[in-house]
Amino acid sequence: MAFERGGSGLGLVRRAWWDGELKEFVHPADGSAAIERSPGTSTAGLRAEPVPIARTEGGQPLQGQLIGRPVIPADGTRPLHLPMLKAHCDGSGACCASYHHMPTTSEDAARIRAVMKDRWEGPVPLDDVFYPAFDEAPEGPLNVVEVDGGCAFLEDDGRCAVHAAGGAEAKPLGCRAFPAVLVACGEEWHASLRSECACMERYATSGAPLHADPQSWANLRAGFVRVWCVPDTVKIDAERSLPRDDYVNWMRGTVASLSKSFDPVEVLMDAESAMGLSPGAGDGAWLASVAETLEAELPELERTHPPGSAYRAAIEWGAETARGLVEDPSAETGWGRGMAQHQGRVGCQLATSVLHGHTLLEQPLLGPALTELRRILWLGLHAAAVRPAREVDGRLESMTAWIFLWRNVLPKEA
């Protein structure tokens, strides 16, 4: 079986400090076991072959079905469409403790060193906090050392030390923008938020509306060096496709249905039917494969991530809840009607963020991606029948943790 994992197609270099020691790992792009080495040494002779970056016939990079291109003058005049979503950041630091890599430029690093030079108290010298993220691209993006399972600049209270010292503009663009998504769709910009951030679940019904801060979206757009675009034709499966306008109408119709529902799984199942898919086929086998995949990650996690890592906690919890639901798929959460409806509404909001941000098009085929999203939301809603994510790690929430695992850990069949 062939798998596709997103990213640069290069082995990621990752440095992590815990238990008084700086460790270094290379995570091959093919998803194989990380290679541990002495910090700063080469993996020549050990390096796995890079996974080629997918491109269009014209040479433009592909992220699933989304096509990358440089910024053009017309980008500044396209209308911006925002979904009816709410959001708020609670400063828990979960996102800063969940990712292997936040792309950082040499300019970002120089700015942050200047801001932090009289404030830095971390265990790794400030000059060594940034390092090349890829052996094959030493002049390319930098990575940031992890300290005790999170970004080196993550403080004990969950706040960003760089933000505290120099304001939001002192941080790398990727940090300032997260979890915002901005995709060009024909003559429009479609905006959304990455729904794997725990704050998306906590404040889905009580945060500030996305349209309340148009300047932030304009600033994000102005910082682009590459634009991701919805293609003219969207592939449903190996045999069928949709013109972009028909796909957008389907997306908007599904979003409208989600806005009136308390059951995202039912709405997405209807959306699968409308697309001619067969909802429900193989769900049990898929769930078992998810449990097996995450369980297989556990020995590697003990070697490469400290116990306090939110990334490690999410995978351990995911393996536990997936296995629990395999063994008892009828397990009940014990929610009353009010809580069940609230959780359902939150799930609908999270599904809306995925659809409006065209996250499904980050996979090669729309149909399988839609089916996976419906299954993942079912998992997120039912995981509490085994154990809520926040009981394992207070930085996590169940539905957003499962969306994180889906987007960043679980392999996608090519």
Image (spheres, grey):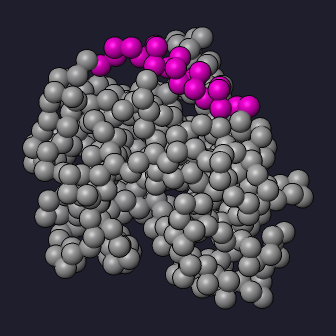
| Residue 327 sits above or below residue 276 on the image | above
| Residue 264 sits above or below residue 16 on the image | above
Q: Which residues are magenta?
A: 279-299
394 vs 84, left or right, is right
Residue 369 horizontal/vertical position (percent): 33, 34
Position of the N terminus by quadrant: top left
Q: Is 199 included in the stretch rendered in magenta?
A: no
Q: Quadrant of residue 227?
A: bottom left
Q: Is 282 included in the stretch rendered in magenta?
A: yes
Residue 135 horizontal/vertical position (percent): 60, 60
Nearest to the observer: residue 203 or residue 223: 223
Residue 409 horizontal/vertical position (percent): 54, 39
- Residue 196 in sight from this viewpoint: no
Furthest-front residue in this view = 45
- Residue 397 in sight from this viewpoint: yes
269 vs 42, left or right, is left
Nearest to the observer: residue 275 or residue 339: 275
Q: Residue at x 83, y 55 (%)?
A: 18
| Residue 35 sits above or below residue 237 on the image | below
Q: Residue at x 41, y 48 (%)?
A: 52
Q: Residue at x 46, y 41 (%)?
A: 5
Q: Dominant secondary structure of the magenta stretch?
A: helix
Residue 241 horizontal/vertical position (percent): 14, 35
Position of the C terminus by quadrant: top left
